[in-house]
Image (cartoon, rainbow, N blue to C red):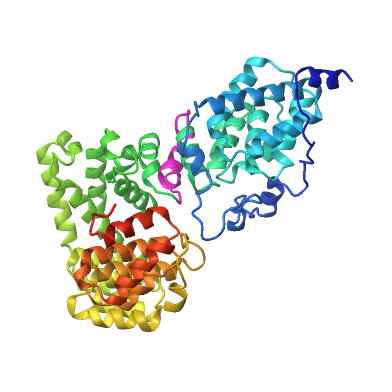
Amino acid sequence: MIDWIKKILNNEESKEILEWETDDSILVHLKRNLNKNGSLNETAEKLPDEKKADDEIKFAPGLMDAMFGADESEESKSRIKQLASLIKKIAKNGDNQSQSDFYREVTENESVIGIIDEFLQKLVQSSLPIEPHLYNYANKLATKTNNRNTVKFGIAILGLCQNKKPINDIKILGLHDEFTVFSTIAISNLSDNLVNDLWELAKQVDGWGKIQLVDRLAEMELNNEIRDWLVLEGYKNNIMYEYLALTCAKNGMLNEKLNTRSIDDNLYSSASDIIVALMDEGPAIGMSGYDDSSETIENFIKHSKKRNLNISNYITLHKIKDYLEESPEKNETLKNWHQNDLSNCLIDINELLNSKDWTTEVQIALKSSDNIEYWNGKQAAQKLGIDLWNTVWQKLKQNPVDSSAWYDVTENAKENNVEEIIDFAIKNLPLDFLGSGPKDSAGIGEDYQKYSSLDSVITFLEKYPKKGEKLILVGLDSPVTRNRNMAIRVLDKWKSDNWSNEITEKVKGLKEIEPNEDTKKNIGRLINGEELE
């Protein structure tokens, strides 16, 4: 009665109390998909609350949380205030209505990363009682719900509850990149052996969660075994090695490990990966943030001189050569090099690159069914000036809907190959399927290879006005927006003088039915002879 009177006085309207607990939770889903080695099967990646269709663009697990920080908007401040008020009621008396309302508020909003830190700060400042209601509620959010946002809030609150009972469940949740960061923070508050627990988790994850976890782990006091792991395995992830190369080189003491008389094959291979990643400054800070860059490269070359080099080594050494030959204006890291050291490195690399005839090894690699070996063969062939046309053409004939093979063919084609390529595309690509009508689709589901193959063919035709018109018409009728955009840009390059009547009518008709607004505007610019955006 008292609660009812308070709601009347506060003009609060009661909402339906949801049945939010489930035995088919995200935690249960992950436990079902555990490997014997303690990591997750691939089938675990798609969580029960996944809503995106196969042809829609999806963020990699954990990417949203890695990209976005605190949300300072008034709307978010209002949400935080509401959530803090609800959690206060839950902590004090386990109020069922507040539990339901908190669950509803968290699940009805897609992202929580922008508010969760500020919410937790308010929770700490409130000095709320943990037992029995707050802990029980947080534990159920983490382990008895099938919504990723509620799991994140549950893990985060559990990290503040100082109760070690759920730590094993938190570790299992942390195996999924969507929850790794949240689990890492909770484990940091609950673990009796923090460094080891975080290291064990880091060994089982592979995506954005690993990137953030290794960055955190590397800042701690590490033993030699973990430092060795950083250099040999820690940098590896399925996003880009560049994100962890610097962290692992510095904290794993890569240069000290290379500054010895001899090293084993595993360290040589890992050093190769890390050096190549450090030279790519695009995604993250690399050599420019690495004080030992020159000595590390010198030591790597020293060890290269003692090895029986393979094609992968050849490619790495060539990349180092290209890097060292950049002008200091383009590559400011080279300003820190002594000129004699730079010259000596280039002399040594050139000797290594010319130490044997690589042609036979390249030809063997190009015939390999192993994708990595074949890729290495292509890269080496390009460095050696070996013509790849026959190789890539035969590769495409083996699988006419292999998008990477189509890319290679169009990249290595000469003018006398144009008609042959167009004829092969018309005969081998599923044109009726690819031209089934405009939709605003991303084309990234099971039919990705088909649409991506069409991408390469359309782009290839840009340099050949009037040729392959049938393929351009298919592109304009593709349900994948990207295909239509490419066809429009090709026609822009061709200029309207080279359009047939059928092309002209197709473009005009597409303007009327185009489902994507940006593409529709570009079609208007194309028709009016204006510059495309």
Number of numbered discs overlaid on the protein picture: 0
Using the rendered view, name the quadrant where residue 452 is placed. bottom left
Residue 366 seen by the camera? no
The reply to whether residue 340 is visible in this rendering is yes
Quadrant of the rendered structure where residue 112 is?
Answer: top right
Q: Which residue, as the protein is rendered here, is positioned at the far right?
A: 1
Name the residue at 31% across, 63% down: 488
- For the N terminus, give its image quadrant: top right
Residue 287 in which image quadrant: top left
The residue located at (66%, 28%) in the rendering is 157
Q: Is residue 220 magenta?
A: yes
Residue found at x 37% / y 57%: 519
Q: Is residue 297 left or right of residue 103?
A: left
Q: Position of residue 272 (x, y in %)?
A: 32, 50
Vertical position of residue 291 compared to residue 503: above or below: above
Residue 419 screen position, x and y as percent = 24, 82
The location of residue 154, given as percent across then percent down, is 67, 34
- What stretch of residues is rendered in magenta? 217-238
Q: Name the side, left or right, on which 452 lies relative to 172.
A: left
Q: Relative to the observer, which residue lies in front, 338 or 465?
A: 465
Residue 420 placement, left or right of 192 = left
Give the x, y percent position of residue 77: 56, 24
Assess whether residue 206 is covered by the magenta stretch: no
User: Where 147 falls versus 399 (above or below)?
Assistant: above
Give the answer, above or below, for where 168 lies relative to 270.
Answer: above
Q: Residue at x 39, y 34 (%)?
A: 251
